[in-house]
């Protein structure tokens, strides 16, 4: 019995070692097993495609990690889409990919390593928001955020300082936009607040100097507004008085909002 167990263990080790040295011939990814062979980490890419869709499974095993430096200095890459199976993007995973201009990050991702996109000067990231992840390690490249209806609270300061952020989609389901959630998102020009939102906390959009259009799809109780934030000037009074509708101002520095 002991010999049988030892033999099976050795075979498993050999199989994992062989797996680690090979890559999926169909998609040209190098990969290694994790968690005793229950998941896969991408360690490299041998292909030459400009547009890459990372597969959700390799050899029927879920791809959960993009390893450290997996695509580093790959100047062929223009666009990358990650599957919903991926939870982690490693350190410097896409650093030096100077032609990379589009990455879609699913809401399954809960960890992005430091310098993951360093040197990607023309990059635009679309992030399907995950409350477990902050934008700190990729906020300089974040252009588009989609907050799905499964999310109820946009956390405090989660997008603070994302100066490249131009577009936010908040789906119906969010009830609270947290303190300083979009603080100093200086490129954000417009936002729509769905009717599920019942509270916008202090400074949620403070410092959004390009914000010229805000659409409220529902009526928020005046008790859930700070006296000065999130919208300075007369927007707060107009909204509480006017309710549902679109409010605009001629430029980001103006404190005069007009209901359309």
Image (cartoon, rainbow, N blue to C red):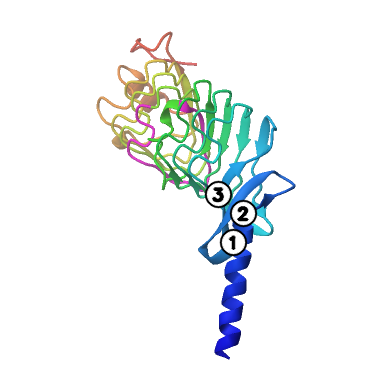
Q: Residues within 10 Å of mark 1 (few under 14, many from 20)?
A: few
Residue that label 2 marks: 21
- Residue 168 or 108: which is nearer the viewer? 108
* Cα–Cα span, label 2 and label 3: 21 Å
Q: Which residue is painted at 63% across and 30% down in the image?
A: 79
Residue that label 1 marks: 17
Q: Is residue 12 visible?
A: yes
Circles 2 and 1: CB atoms closer than 8 Å: yes
Q: Is residue 170 visible?
A: no
Q: Which residue is painted at 53% across and 30% down in the image?
A: 125
For residue 86, the mark is: 3
Circles 1 and 3: CB atoms closer than 8 Å: no
- Residue 52 or 211: which is nearer the viewer? 52
Placement of the N terminus among the 4 image quadrants: bottom right
As helix, strand or loop, the secondary structure at mark 2 comes to helix
Q: With respect to residue 128, does 185 lie above or below?
A: above
Q: Residues within 10 Å of mark 2 (few under 14, many from 20)?
A: few
As helix, strand or loop, the secondary structure at mark 3 comes to loop
Q: Which residues are magenta?
A: 141-161
Circles 2 and 3: CB atoms closer than 8 Å: no
- Residue 55 or 185: which is nearer the viewer? 55
Q: Is residue 128 magenta?
A: no
* Cα–Cα span, label 1 and label 3: 22 Å
């Amino acid at each position: 019995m002991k010999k049988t167990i030892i033999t099976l263990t050795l075979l498993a080790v050999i199989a994992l070692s062989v797996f680690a040295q090979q890559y999926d011939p169909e998609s040209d990814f190098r990969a290694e097993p994790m968690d005793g062979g229950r998941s896969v980490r991408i360690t490299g890419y041998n292909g030459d495609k400009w547009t890459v869709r990372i597969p959700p499974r390799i050899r029927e095993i879920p791809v959960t990690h993009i390893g450290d430096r997996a695509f580093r200095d790959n100047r062929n890459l223009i666009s990358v889409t990650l599957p919903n199976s991926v939870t982690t993007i490693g350190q410097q995973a896409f650093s030096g990919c100077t032609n990379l201009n589009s990455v879609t990050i699913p809401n399954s991702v809960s960890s992005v390593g430091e310098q993951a996109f360093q040197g990607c000067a023309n990059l635009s990231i679309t992030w399907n928001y995950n409350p477990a992840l902050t934008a700190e390690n990729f906020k300089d490249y974040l252009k588009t955020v989609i907050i799905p209806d499964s999310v109820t609270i946009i956390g405090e300061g989660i997008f603070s300082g994302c100066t490249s952020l131009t577009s936010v989609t908040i789906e119906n389901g969010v009830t609270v936009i947290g303190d300083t959630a979009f603080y100093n998102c200086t490129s954000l020009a417009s936002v729509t607040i769905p009717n599920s939102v019942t509270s916008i906390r202090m400074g949620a959009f403070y410092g959004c100097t390009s914000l010229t259009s805000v659409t409220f799809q529902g009526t928020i109780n005046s008790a859930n507004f700070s006296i000065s934030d999130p919208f300075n000037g007369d927007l707060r009074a107009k909204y509480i008085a006017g309710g549902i509708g679109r409010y605009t101002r001629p430029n980001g520095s103006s404190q005069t909002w007009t209901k359309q």
